[in-house]
Image (tube, helix red, strand yellow):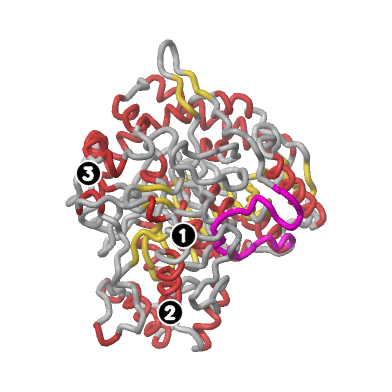
Amino acid sequence: MSQTRSPKDDPREPASTGETAPGEVSRRSFLRLGALAGAGASVAGLWQPADATAETAPATPSDLEEATIAGLQAAMASGSLSSVELVDFYLRRIEALDQSGPTVNSVLALNPQARAIARARDRERRETGPRGPLHGIPILLKDNIDTGDRMQTTAGSLALAGAPAPQDATVAARLRQAGAVILGKTNLSEWANFRGFSSTSGWSGVGGQTRNPYFLDRNPCGSSSGSGAAVSANFTTVALGTETDGSIVCPASLNGVVGIKPTVGLTSRAGVVPISHTQDTVGPYGRTVADAAAVLGALTGVDPRDPATAHSAGHFHADYRPFLDPDGLNGARIGVLRNGVTGYSAYTDTIFEEALAVMADAGAILVDPADIPTMDQLLTDQAELIVLIREFKQDLNAYLATRTGVPVHTLAGVIAFNEAHAGQELKWFGQELMILAEQEIFSEEEYLDALERGPRLAGPEGIDAALATFGVDALVAPTGSPAWPTDLVNGDHFLGASSFPAAMAGYPIVNVTGGFAFGLPVGISFMGTAFSEPTLIKLASGFEAAAHTRRRPRLRPTLPVDGPSGAHRLQAKATRIERLLERLGTKARLPRLHSL
């Protein structure tokens, strides 16, 4: 039943004291204001001593673990569950397992108005019916997405700690309109991992280190680290992340969840702390393809605040659930990517081969290999780096101009703030990328050339050419390696990935868990041309139905190196030195970027 709603229908005030349930923790803010309060966040304090072989036993309700949106809506429709009860379940679980106990540390701040909003959604369900599939469903947002409420938007940086953003990001506003309950903000790789070399994914000055819920000493990847980890650990039903290159799909892979990286322009970036207007996009996480698809539909639509969304007109869908198909692999032609995206991890390659066998058994026609013809050029070209460094300064300065009540208003101000608070912000790694962007090391001519060359090599001459040449519906590749041990001293032990062609082209990817190595999830990525999300969702849901790979994480403290089957150890490889991108003339040689 439809009706016109005013802002009063979406309450922004917390419940009165008399309506607060015992054990409610929604008024507690986990936002750490270390530098501003005179006490930095303690990274060391995040690590809890534990028996290396022990399994954490969660002392928290578990009856709603792994619940899907469809199952939750059925329970709420029957009256056996309310949105308030669901919110309380997640709040208690976050308190017991994320903020204490195993300390996954995926949630940066909780919405003090979450229960009031949930209560309003419950009342609305009784009086007028649900708005849609997200009605009353809790969702966490990556903390680079603005919310015009009492929560701050920091991008993980103490330089943005202060007053909240003046208004919702468009995606946040659309989630509210869809009836979702914004539960809080998630930790992330600070500034979406566009700060310095040798960074550690999942670390931020505000939040400290996010941990992988499968084995807590393993890395969750980034930059949407908290969003992927929180969904996997059942701290929320669904979450939002952002991606410039790998930041949705890599955390989805390492945390064993579904991540949809949409076509650039399918979802609005207005009100999102940026890296690059050419490559940035916002997308959902879910434990199932169906849940991620349900969220995606709520995010789409042309937005005057983001000109890139104009390209989505006639291509977006308000509901992607009709494209779900448990038999989606049968008869599908899928191209197998190998060159440039395999060979860096024996375990990843093994899982990929097993996933391909599942696809073939489910009726898929595999064209193997179906390599991207420009892959060798993409692996050595510096176009992406030029575009990101050139756009970061102008895009970030434009965003910072919308913020008041925070310590910084320009990229130069951020750099100066970090230097003044080096003990909190620069303890583990530097801000070389920010400095290079501020210095505008690439010329306008270099930028314009890269802006044309990179998307062309990755899109029309790359992914599109492979699709046409091999006559396939989509391409598939392993997403990345199993999770590496978190190493704040040396940074990420990153081996390889497949996200960069789609990132440079602005094309979509859907990650779904392909299998496990030593209990660590490894994802596979279905990718295609612009606005091919319906096809990718069909294929990913078909694989999900055939493979049944989702495993609930047990929050174990560490990966045992010895087990009943013998002395198994993860691959004993030194950290691979990333491909170096050489600048013209005497310009510095810079590392290839990942997980942005």
180 over 167 or under it: above or below: below
Q: Which mark is residue 446?
A: none
Can residue 305 be seen from the camera position used here?
Answer: no
State the extent of the magenta-drawn residues as a range.
546-568
Q: Mark 2 points at which residue?
A: 83
Q: Residue at x 76, y 46 (%)?
A: 353
Q: Residue 104 carries which label?
A: 1
The reply to whether callout 3 and callout 2 are in contact (CB within 8 Å) is: no
> Which secondary structure is most common in the magenta stretch?
loop
Task: Give the alpha-carbon distance from disc 2 to disc 1, as whole Å.
Answer: 24 Å
Q: Which residue is drawn at 55% across and 54% down?
A: 259
Mark 1 or 3: in front is 1
Question: Label 1 neighbourhood size at 10 Å, few (<14), some (14-19), many (20+)?
Answer: many
Upstream in sequence: badge 3 or badge 2:
2
Task: Give the alpha-carbon distance from disc 3 to disc 2, as whole Å.
Answer: 37 Å
Mark 3 or 2: in front is 2
On the picture, is 167 further left or further right than 73? Answer: left
Q: Where is residue 275 in the image (x, y as percent from the top left)?
A: 38, 40
Q: State the image quarter where residue 68 is shown.
A: bottom right
Question: Label 2 neighbourhood size at 10 Å, few (<14), some (14-19), many (20+)?
Answer: many
Q: Name the residue under label 3.
A: 401
Task: Give the alpha-carbon distance from disc 1 to disc 3, as whole Å.
Answer: 34 Å
Can residue 93 be seen from the camera position used here?
Answer: yes
Depth order, front residue of 280/140: 140
150 over 264 or under it: above or below: below
Q: Position of residue 308 (x, y in %)?
A: 41, 44
Mark 2 or 1: in front is 1
At mark 1, the secondary structure is loop
Question: Label 3 neighbourhood size at 10 Å, few (<14), some (14-19), many (20+)?
Answer: few
